[in-house]
Every structure is written in C-alpha cells, then in structure tokens.
Image (tube, grey):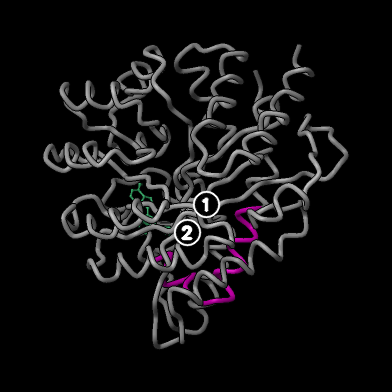
Amino acid sequence: MDMEWWVSQPKIELHAHLNGSIRDSTLLELARVLGEKGVLDIAGLEHVIKKNCRSLPECFKLFDLIHVLTTDHATVTRITKEVVEDFAAENIVYLELRTTPKKNESIGMSKRSYMDAVIRGLRTVDAVDVAFIPSQTSSENSITPVTGACETTRKKIYIRLLLSIDRRETTAAALETVQLALEMRDLGVVGIDLSGNPIVGKWETFLPALKFAKEQGLLVTLHCGEVPNRKEIQAMLDFVPQRIGHACFLEEEDWEKLKSSKIPVEICLTSNIMTQTIASLDDHHFVDLYNMKHPLVLCTDDAGVFSTSLSQEYSIAASSFGIGKWEMFQLARDAIEFVFADDTVKKDLREIFDSAERKLR
Ligand code: 6MZ
C-alpha cells in the first residue's frame, strides 16, 4: 500500500503536542529572523533542527529552543493554524491538540492570553472547516465525509484541546492550568495532559491538580512510563486516567494492571524509536497490546520534531507488524471510542468512517 492510500483514509489524532508539530520550514524561518536580529546565534542551529534522531534529553533541549522561537502571541496563532491545516490535509477528521499554556510577563503573556492566541489560530484556519466550539458542533457542521485524495468538497476537522501541565511546574502552576481548562470548556478544552521531561518533577507535585481536574469532570491523559520509574507508573495507573501515553517501561505487574483497567494507550512509534526509548519496532509493546485487543490508538506525538505524519505511523505499523489494510482501518475507527469529545461528535465520526468504509468495500 502506498502512502497515498494511508493519507486518503480518515484518521483520528489523540496525542499531538502543538509545539512539537510545528513545520520544519516555519521553525527555520523563525530561527533565521531571530538570527538576523542578532537575538540568536544560528550557527549550528539548522543542524539541530534538521537532525532526525535525538535522545529524549536532546529532545527536551530542542523544545526549549522551539519555545524561544514560538512563544509570542502572533507566532502561537500562526503555528496553531498551520498545524491544524497540516493534520486536516492528511484526512485527520478529529484532532485532540495539546499544548502547555505559557506565562511570560516580559511580553505580557499569561496562560490565558497564550490560549487565546491558540483559539485565534483555530479561527483563522481557512483552508478547511474547523469545528471546535462544542455547543455549535451539531448545528454548525454538516457532515462532509472524507472519501479520498480526489475529494472535491471541503475537508472538515473536529478539534478539541487538552491543556498540558509541564513536569517542571509547581503545584500552584498546575492548578492554574486546570482552572484555565475549566474556564475554557466552552471553547473546546476537554481535558488535561501531564507531559514534559519525564526525569523532572514528582508525581505528588501534580496530583492535587490532576485530582481537582478529575473532580471537575475534565478528562485526563498522562505520559506514563516514558522512562523506568516503577513507583510513579504504579501511582499513575492507580489514578486511573482516561488514557495514557507511551507506556514503554511497564513491568509485568503493571502490564496486568493496565490490561485489566482497559485504559487506552496512545502509541507513538516513531517518537519511541527516535528517542531510543524502544530499541526497535520488533520490541515494541504495540504488538502485545494489539494482539490482546487492548484499547490503543496510533499517534504522532511531535510530527514536526520527528518528521512524521499520522499516515506514516499507520503505514509503519502495517508494514512492521504485518497488519492488513482492513484491520488498520478498524484500528483507526476504534479510536472514536477513546476521544474526549461528547457523543454528538462520536456519532458524526462514526458516520464519517462508515461512509469511508462503504467506499472501501
Ligand atoms: C513528554 C513531551 C514529549 O506544549 O509547548 N512534549 N513531553 N514526552 C514527549 N515525548 C517525546 N513531546 C512533547 O509542546 C511541546 C511540549 O510538549 C511536551 C514537552 O513539555 C514540550 O516542551 P507545547 O505545545
């Protein structure tokens, strides 16, 4: 199967970090502008940006650099728009985009104004129809089935937002993010993510904010087991989040707990390989989870940083694990059950997949 086939099929993306999904070309352009202004020494920077294999610690250094380049309101708006257009272009019909609200007093940025810039980005997308305000979801959007590369009608993408707590943050900062998520529920914010450098920060620091989020009905996904950390992995599974990301370093007992809990796992193949979290695809836990019929969803993590796309992740899984086209289509459809959006959206998504399926038969 060629890439065109994977691109043409409807897909659901549930684990994508905004700043990790930025286009290479935009990143280089922003770096050059700051370089010309003398704000940044860009010697060697292009090499860093273009490097296509980096360890997990190197990745977080790159994120700090990306944040220097992107964290002003106009750029946040621009990259949001571009990221949405890029996902929609490859027939992602539902995108749960996550980002860490950032505060920078020197440029008048609060977590709220950062998120407002993201929302402006969603509003300025013009290449495709964007459905992100929950109350308007059913009336605003007639269903545009995604049927293939030669589709002539406009594409449509549902978007929901997750606010990320960075593991460098304090309990108070994490609570502020949860509070903001609650305030922005009518703008499509549906949940909270815990992410950032997995060797930084302690679970106990974030727990009060995550508990509060849960009590308030926000849905939670956690980066879990990206590095070996037995105690934290156990505590995370005991918290019973609605989904977890990665799950690379679980021990036997944790696997049992995960499997009986049926917590869906967001699998990011290229990310795990590039960061050398998993040595090779042959060793990837995808196979075991897939064979067990454990709920799972293929995701990109950081499509820009890892030079991948969701279509490519599907293609890699199919060829590496010998899974047929039809099964892969079902895998993509199964993700409907794990989205954090409400039943109206799920119903629309089912219709989109049904319509695509009729064309496949
Ligand atoms: C953990 C990750 C990540 O939030 O600024 N992030 N956290 N593990 C990963 N695996 C490679 N990839 C990205 O997007 C970038 C931020 O997302 C988190 C990190 O906190 C990173 O700084 P935003 O839009």
Callout in the foreground (1, 2): 1
In the image, 214: left or right of 34?
A: left
Is residue 83 part of the magenta span, yes or no?
yes
Residue 166 in the image: x percent, y percent?
A: 31, 60
Disc 1 or 2, which lies upstream in sequence?
2
Tell me the kind of residue under disc 2.
Asn
**Residue drawn where x is 15% and y is 23% of the image:** 253
CB of residue at label 2: within 8 Å of ligand 1?
yes
Write down the quadrant of residue 345 in the picture. Answer: top right
Label 2 element class: helix
Image quadrant of ligand 1? bottom left
CB of residue at label 1: within 8 Å of ligand 1?
no
Q: Nearer the viewer, residue 251 or 139?
A: 139
Residue to which mark 1 is pinned: 97
**Residue drawn where x is 72% and y is 31% of the image:** 352
Tell me the kind of residue under disc 1.
Leu
User: Tags 1 and 2 in contact by the CB under 8 Å rule?
Assistant: no
Q: Label for residue 19? A: 2
In the image, 10: left or right of 260?
A: right
Q: Which residues lie in the magenta part?
A: 65-84
Residue 337 in the image: x percent, y percent?
A: 52, 30
